[in-house]
């Protein structure tokens, strides 16, 4: 049966493929594809695991003390029956043979299928057997892990592999931690659907950086969509169409081809300098999460990196922090890949919806920290861990010997923080000098993403070389809207007059002070805001590499002087979005 689920569109385009439910942390297994030639061995692994668990259960049964309650023996019988049911192992084999899933993935896929069947049962007794099935599968997974070559890959590891003629795969999950999204970057998935999340949650940001269609905040997609269902993701409007009709499929395939053509057309702008009609040169920089992303940045025509979110180097390490040497190599790799163009490294910004481990924002919110977005995150965490902070600064300063680096500090709200940072920098430079390490001076910038920083900017500006406006958090804190919470996503409004006022005055004050200013939040990469940001006097934008061509096209068609004249009308309007459409409209230009 065909049906639709709606959510928040976070990454544009159309994806069509089969659903892969990576549903719950209960199924904490590696996902990877096995080669055709290895399929017989992989099915044997599944059978070996079954035999091992059968032996385990039989032994447990035999060793039950005579006075053990009868229910225990009966329970073990139920487990044995489930284990030998063809709906489990035979169907698991089918996932391996037909879809090339590794045994763990195949087993967890089949668990999802069966768990749903149990959920739908009328009979209470039978419905409750789901827990038994889960226990049996857990035993099987444990047995598999003892001979798994892929177990060490971790829960989210899905290794890239070309499958000519295979159906594309779309990931469906209740929630995905940013750390897992990072793993998915190397994966086969061509689209994402999650129940949780907002437009600028970090899960959405990483999905966008992968440049594949994504819809978040659907609330129930992972419950409604079944393993292997055919699904269309319409990342432009936030719709998910499950089991589409042939006509729908045809229509969306057509749209998919159109958007590919449009992308190909835009990439031709790659070497065109971003200059407005009235001759203003605009810097279009890239936001990256890993040094390897710099390649995509250069390919997209970025003229620098405006935001290297260094915290992603700190994730997926089981609590360990990256060493100074490892960080140095990463920063050096990024700066070298950019070939002389500037690279802005932001010091670690963990916390809120970016925990170090695989915890999702939702788990964090409900189980661990009272109010993570307002807690010990970003520079607050760095200053609370001075040794860790010095280590990161040393790595950054050492990398400065290999190219043009800039240092950006997240979540600054107090002058005292800047003083502490400067003192730490002075110490770090002294340490490096004493050790004979090469480094150069680096410009120091702060993110303007807490309203307090925007309001007191004239006091902060004399102490820094540049500012970067983080609109994602600035909107979150100005409007008191959790950026990762789909329940209030409709109130997360970049067009809110208060938000526009703060951005506009920050840009103006930085320019007046002769300090460079850029915007690196998601607004910078959204063409809906290019005109208004240009009108405010912004000349440096930082965004995901994939967004650069479209923003550049917008810049090439803009007259910055004319836009600036229309700005007061927009800033004073009750509905700035509508006012902008009218005020910035160019006769004859399609908006
Ligand atoms: C922002 O807040 O706008 C920003 C760029 O930082 P992050 O999204 O990583 O919090
Ligand atoms: Mg931020």
Image (cartoon, rainbow, N blue to C red):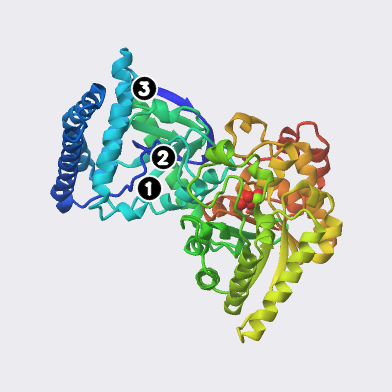
Secondary structure of the residue carrying tag 2 is: loop
As drawn, is 90 to the left or to the right of 458? left
- Tell me residue 583's x, y (percent): 76, 39
Q: Nearer the viewer, mark 1 or mark 3?
A: 1
- Tell me residue 419's x, y (percent): 79, 65
Q: Residues within 10 Å of mark 1 (few under 14, many from 20)?
A: some
State yes or no: discs 2 and 3 in contact (Cβ < 8 Å). Answer: no
Residue 214 seen by the camera: yes
Q: Residue at x 63, y 71 (%)?
A: 405
Instruction: Find the distance from the CA under tag 1 to the CA under tag 3.
Output: 31 Å
Among numbered discs 1 and 3, the one appearing first in the sequence: 3
Pointer 3 residue: 2
Please say if 252 is above or below 353.
above
Pointer 1 residue: 155
- Tell me residue 32's x, y (percent): 30, 49
Q: Nearer the viewer, mark 2 or mark 3?
A: 2
- Tell me residue 238's x, y (percent): 51, 33
Q: Residue at x 46, y 48 (%)?
A: 181
Secondary structure of the residue carrying tag 3 is: loop
State yes or no: discs 2 and 1 in contact (Cβ < 8 Å). Answer: yes
Instruction: Find the distance from the CA under tag 2 to the CA under tag 3.
Output: 28 Å
């Amino acid at each position: 049966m065909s049906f639709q689920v709606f959510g928040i569109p976070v990454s544009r385009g159309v994806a069509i493929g089969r659903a892969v439910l990576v549903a719950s942390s209960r199924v904490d297994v590696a996902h990877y594809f096995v080669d055709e030639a290895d399929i017989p061995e992989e099915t044997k692994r599944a059978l070996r695991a079954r035999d091992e668990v059968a032996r385990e259960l039989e032994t447990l049964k035999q060793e039950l003390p005579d006075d053990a309650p009868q229910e225990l023996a009966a329970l073990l019988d139920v487990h044995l029956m489930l284990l030998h049911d063809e709906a489990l192992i035979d169907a698991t084999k089918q996932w391996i043979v037909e879809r090339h899933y590794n045994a763990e993935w195949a087993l967890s896929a089949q668990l999802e299928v069966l768990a749903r069947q149990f959920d739908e049962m009328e009979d209470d007794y039978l419905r409750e057997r789901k827990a038994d099935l889960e226990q049996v599968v857990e035993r099987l997974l444990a047995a598999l892990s003892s001979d798994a070559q892929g177990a060490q890959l971790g829960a989210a590891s899905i290794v890239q592999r070309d499958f000519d003629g295979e159906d594309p795969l779309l990931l469906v999950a209740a929630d995905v931690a940013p750390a897992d999204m990072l793993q998915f970057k190397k994966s086969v998935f061509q689209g994402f659907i999650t129940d949780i999340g907002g437009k600028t949650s970090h899960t959405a940001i990483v999905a966008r950086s992968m440049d594949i269609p994504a819809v978040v905040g659907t609330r129930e997609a992972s419950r409604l969509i079944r393993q292997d269902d055919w699904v269309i993701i319409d990342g432009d409007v936030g719709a998910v169409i499950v089991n589409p009709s042939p006509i729908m499929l045809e229509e969306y395939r057509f749209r998919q081809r159109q958007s590919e053509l449009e992308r190909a057309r835009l990439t031709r702008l790659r070497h065109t300098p971003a200059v407005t009609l009235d001759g203003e040169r605009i810097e279009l920089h890239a936001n990256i999460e890993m040094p390897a992303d710099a390649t995509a940045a250069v390919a997209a025509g970025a003229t620098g990196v405006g935001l290297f979110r260094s915290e992603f180097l700190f994730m997926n390490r089981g609590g360990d922090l990256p060493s100074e040497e490892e960080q140095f190599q990463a920063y050096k790799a990024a700066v070298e890949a950019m070939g002389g163009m500037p690279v802005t490294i932001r010091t670690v910004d963990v916390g809120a919806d970016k925990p170090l481990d695989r915890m999702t924002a939702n788990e964090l919110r409900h189980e661990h920290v009272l109010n993570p977005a307002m807690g010990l995150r970003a520079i607050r965490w760095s200053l609370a861990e001075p040794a860790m902070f010095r280590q990161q600064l040393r790595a950054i300063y050492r990398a400065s010997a290999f190219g043009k680096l800039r240092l950006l500090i997240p979540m600054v709200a107090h002058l005292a923080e800047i003083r502490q940072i400067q003192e730490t920098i002075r110490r770090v430079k002294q340490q490096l000098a004493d050790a004979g390490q090469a480094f150069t001076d680096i410009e120091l910038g702060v993110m303007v993403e807490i309203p307090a920083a925007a309001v007191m900017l004239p006091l902060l500006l004399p102490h820094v070389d540049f500012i970067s406006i983080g609109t994602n958090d600035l909107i979150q804190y100005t409007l008191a809207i959790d950026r990762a919470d789909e329940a209030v996503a409709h109130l997360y409004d970049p067009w809110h007059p208060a938000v526009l006022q703060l951005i506009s005055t920050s840009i103006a004050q930085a320019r007046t002070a002769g300090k460079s200013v850029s915007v690196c939040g998601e607004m910078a990469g959204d063409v809906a805001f290019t005109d208004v940001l240009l009108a405010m006097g912004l000349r440096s934008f930082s965004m995901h590499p994939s967004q650069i061509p479209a923003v550049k096209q917008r810049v090439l068609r803009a007259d910055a002087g004319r836009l600036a004249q229309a700005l007061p009308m927009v800033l004073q309007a009750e509905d700035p979005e509508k006012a902008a459409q009218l005020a910035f409209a160019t006769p004859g230009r399609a908006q």
